[in-house]
Image: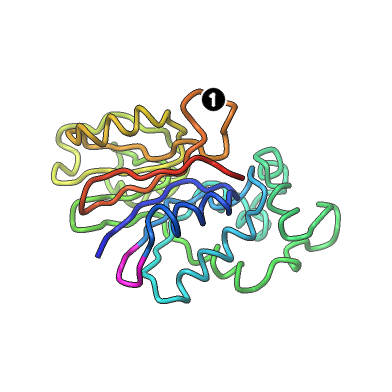
């Protein structure tokens, strides 16, 4: 039995399938923790959500975090914000994957299936795994009296060194901030830190040096697997 942690997918369905089915060869007894940002930027956000739902329905233990991109979708859907923030963060790519060509039509979210809307609403802000690993999308507010209640920090904050006295028995694993694959591999190999980045910028292939990979961390083996983006 293995536990895998997979960060930002951003609509790269072909790459996700390659990682899960070919590289990891996921089996029914395995667990997957996704760190959010399933949607936006890449070509098939709806396909990514469909695939993750399918993994759950197949009996695999699948656990999904909220990313800041899913939060922007939900806020737009609930009318907490207008569509502007989401659109400038590549929300249009997600709408296109659902067959929605214009943001001016009335109640565009009627075109998204209830199953997918329930998926977005069900996402968690953090997981604590094996009583040691805190999984978040973005980061943690070390100065909060209750750091696991600051959902804004979990979605949007960038990583910083963990203070020595902050939850000293725990290690933080996050996505959100694209990091060169060589840096991620080096940090995992050393294994001596208290915060580890996993987002190798799958959707940014060709844009930023060292990015363009989708990663998966095997917690039991403390081993990083990855595939290059093929979307």
Q: Does residue 52 belong to the magenta stretch? A: no
Q: Where on the picture, by quarter, is residue 127?
A: bottom left
Q: Which residue does the image show at 45% across and 34% down from the upper left?
A: 177
How many marks overall? 1
Identify residue for label 1. Answer: 208
The correct choice, above or below, for 108 with respect to 193 in the image is below
Q: Give the x, y percent position of residue 85.
A: 67, 41
Q: Give the x, y percent position of residue 50.
A: 58, 66
Q: Which residue does the image show at 15% across and 36% down from the upper left?
A: 165
Instruction: Sort mark 1 into few (<14), some (14-19) or many (20+) by Cα contacts within 10 Å.
Output: few
The correct choice, above or below, for 113 with respect to 99 in the image is below
The correct choice, above or below, for 101 with respect to 115 in the image is above
Left or right position of 136 against 162: right
Q: Main secondary structure of the magenta part?
A: loop
Left or right position of 177 against 229: left
- The quarter of the picture where the C terminus appears is top right
Q: Give the x, y percent position of residue 108.
A: 77, 61
Q: Residue furthest top?
A: 209
Left or right position of 65 against 54: left
Q: Where on the picture, by quarter, is residue 143?
A: top left
Give the secondary structure at mark 1. loop
- The quarter of the picture where the N terminus appears is bottom left
Q: Give the x, y percent position of residue 158.
A: 42, 33
Q: Which residue does the image show at 34% across and 39% down from the upper left?
A: 141
Magenta segment boundaries in residue numbering: 27-31
Q: How is the image coloured?
A: rainbow
Q: Which residue does the image show at 30% across and 71% down from the upper left?
A: 29
């Amino acid at each position: 039995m293995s536990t895998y942690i997979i960060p930002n997918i951003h609509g790269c369905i072909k790459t996700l399938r390659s990682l899960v089915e070919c590289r990891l060869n996921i089996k029914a007894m395995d667990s997957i923790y996704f760190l959010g940002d399933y949607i936006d930027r890449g070509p098939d956000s709806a396909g990514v959500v469909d695939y993750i739902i399918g993994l759950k329905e197949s009996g695999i233990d699948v656990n999904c975090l909220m990313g800041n991109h899913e939060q922007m979708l939900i806020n737009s859907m609930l009318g907490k914000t207008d569509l502007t923030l989401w659109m400038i963060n590549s929300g249009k790519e997600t709408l296109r994957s659902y067959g929605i060509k214009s943001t001016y039509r009335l109640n565009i979210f009627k075109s998204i299936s209830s199953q997918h809307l329930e998926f977005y609403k069900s996402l968690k802000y953090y997981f604590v795994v094996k009583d040691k690993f805190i999984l978040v999308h973005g980061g943690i507010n070390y100065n909060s009296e209750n750091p696991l209640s600051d959902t804004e920090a979990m979605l949007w904050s960038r990583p910083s060194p963990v203070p020595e006295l902050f939850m000293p028995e725990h290690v933080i694993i996050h996505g959100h901030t694209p990091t060169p694959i060589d840096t991620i591999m080096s940090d995992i190999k050393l294994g001596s830190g208290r915060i580890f980045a996993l987002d190798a910028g799958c959707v940014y292939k060709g844009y930023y040096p060292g990015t363009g990979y989708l990663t998966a961390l095997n917690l039991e083996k403390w081993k990083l697997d990855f595939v290059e983006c093929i979307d």
